[in-house]
Image: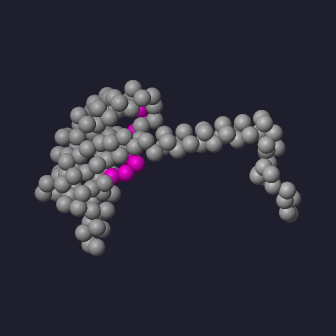
Amino acid sequence: MAQGRRVERVAALIRKEVSELMINGIRDERVHHGMVSITEVEVSGDLQHCKIFVSVFGEAQERDQVLEGLQAASGFLRGELGRRLQMRRAPEVVFQLDRGLERGTSVLGLLNRLEDERQQRGDIPPGSDQQPGSDEQPTG
């Protein structure tokens, strides 16, 4: 169990350091095209591999450019992580686009559209929380 806590601790430190390096250390302009945030860091049990999930707010082209810039800077980041975390061997860093926010926004949009369609058909009165076909009166 101590090994698991160490991996979690290293992942948290990597997240903190890479966030700081993305702001102050990476000079590649591609990285600064969109609003980038680190959503998750996964570190292997042997601390040799690190997968960093990033979310990029912007158009698809901007996301691709940011990801290319981050991949190009991965060697620099690996060296900096080794120095800052004082690790004998810094993990190999791989960036992956996290599409969780994108999917969540898409689902919310679909739910809103469904609700609008149901209101237009008259299935649900506007502003009502009542389910269609329910004869129960609200209490209160």
| Extreme residue toward the front, this view | 133
Quarter holding residue 43: bottom left
- Report the front residue among 2 and 128: 128
Residue drawn at 52 percent across, 44 percent down: 104
| Direction from residue 140 to residue 120 in the image, left or right | left
| Direction from residue 112 to residue 98 in the image, left or right | left
Residue drawn at 33 percent across, 57 percent down: 12
Q: Is residue 80 visible?
A: no
Q: Is residue 22 visible?
A: yes
Residue 57: x and y in percent read 46, 35
Residue 135: x and y in percent read 85, 56
Q: Is residue 29 above or below residue 94?
A: above
- Report the front residue among 30 and 101: 101
| Picture colour scheme | one colour
| Extreme residue toward the left, this view | 88
Residue 89: x and y in percent read 14, 54
| Direction from residue 40 to residue 26 in the image, left or right | left
Taking the magenta stretch, the answer to whether it contains residue 42 is no
Residue 77: x and y in percent read 23, 43
| Quarter occupied by the N terminus | bottom left
Which range of residues does the magenta coloring cover?
Answer: 34-41
Taking the magenta stretch, the answer to whether it contains residue 39 is yes
Quarter holding residue 71: top left
State whether the magenta stretch is mostly helix, strand or loop.
strand
| Quarter occupied by the C terminus | bottom right
